[in-house]
Amino acid sequence: MRPTVLCFSGLDPSGGAGLQADIEAIGQSGAHAAIACTALTIQNSQQVFGFQATSKQLLLAQANAVVIDLPIRCVKSGMLGTTENIVALAEFLAEHPYYLYVLDPVLVANSGGSLGDQATLAKAFQQLMPFATLVTPNTVELYALTGEHDIELATKKLLEMGAKAVLVKGGHEDTPEYIRNALYIQGELISETTCTRLEGEYHGSGCSLASYIAGRLAQGDNIQQAVNHAETWLFGVLQHAESPVPNGQKIPKRF
């Protein structure tokens, strides 16, 4: 069977982000996706209205059932929603230290909707950092996680928390013509990539990128290879993204 990525992520009814994005992106990477659902959200492609988190017990029961019979190679987390779920994931990772782990530190939705108390979650995320093969924050998340407001200082602080590598996504920076991502591994800037900034906003782009990376890691790519493959793939699916409503967020066309 194909190597499997186990995703801890929430259900997005619109299908643009969350576990549906994980499934589609990982499938496109060539791996198989399994899901431990962290929350049921109330949202569409443009706005988050609320959510109900899965209990810690139910979340771990889902994950533990999956690992019995699937060839898990990598874990990916997105929306976790509560500190209890963050603790649950940390416990799970401690029991499975041989899994690779991609941490997408989701604090708020692109629409600005709440996915949990940001300050509380940011502090709780610190206990996941030592398990992380790669963390994929945008700059807003990077600053929230570290309390720093300089990319270099904030990235250094994130690495000091224990993360092995950090991919800083520049989509929220004030660069109208381009987006620049920076990959740091073991404290060293390994690569910077720049792509043209496409018009509009996209629902689920961060989920898709992190999940595709996880799929490539599960298949044996090193971190830099996985990131390069994922960035190239994501730019293509964003170019063909679909617009549910005029002037609203677009949904990446992942197939």
Image (cartoon, rainbow, N blue to C red):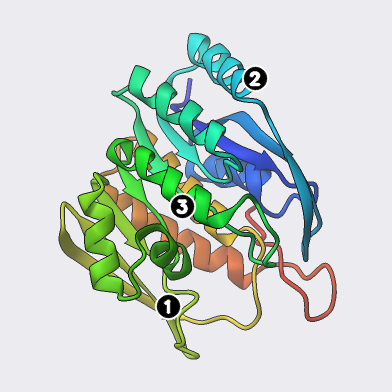
Q: Residue furthest bottom?
A: 176
Task: Tell me the kind of residue under disc 3.
Answer: Ala
Q: Amino acid at mark 1?
A: Cys
* Quarter residue 78 falls in: top right
Residue 24 located left or right of residue 26? right
Q: Are marks 3 and 1 in contact (CB under 8 Å)?
A: no
Q: Earlier in the sequence, mark 1 or mark 2?
A: 2
Q: Secondary structure at mark 3?
A: helix
Q: Is 50 left, or right, of 107 in this rendering?
A: right
3 or 2: tag closer to the N-terminus: 2
Distance of label 3 from label 1 (alpha carbons): 28 Å
Residue assigned mark 1: 195
Residue 224 in view (yes/no): no
Residue 66, relative to residue 120: is it above or below? above
Report the residue at 34% width, 27% height from top: 99
The answer to whether 11 is drawn above or below residue 158 in the figure is: above
Residue carrying label 3: 122
In the displayed structure image, the side of residue 190 where residue 131 appears, left or right: right
In percent of width and height, residue 1 lies at 48, 20
Q: Which mark is residue 58?
A: 2
Residue 55, image quadrant: top right
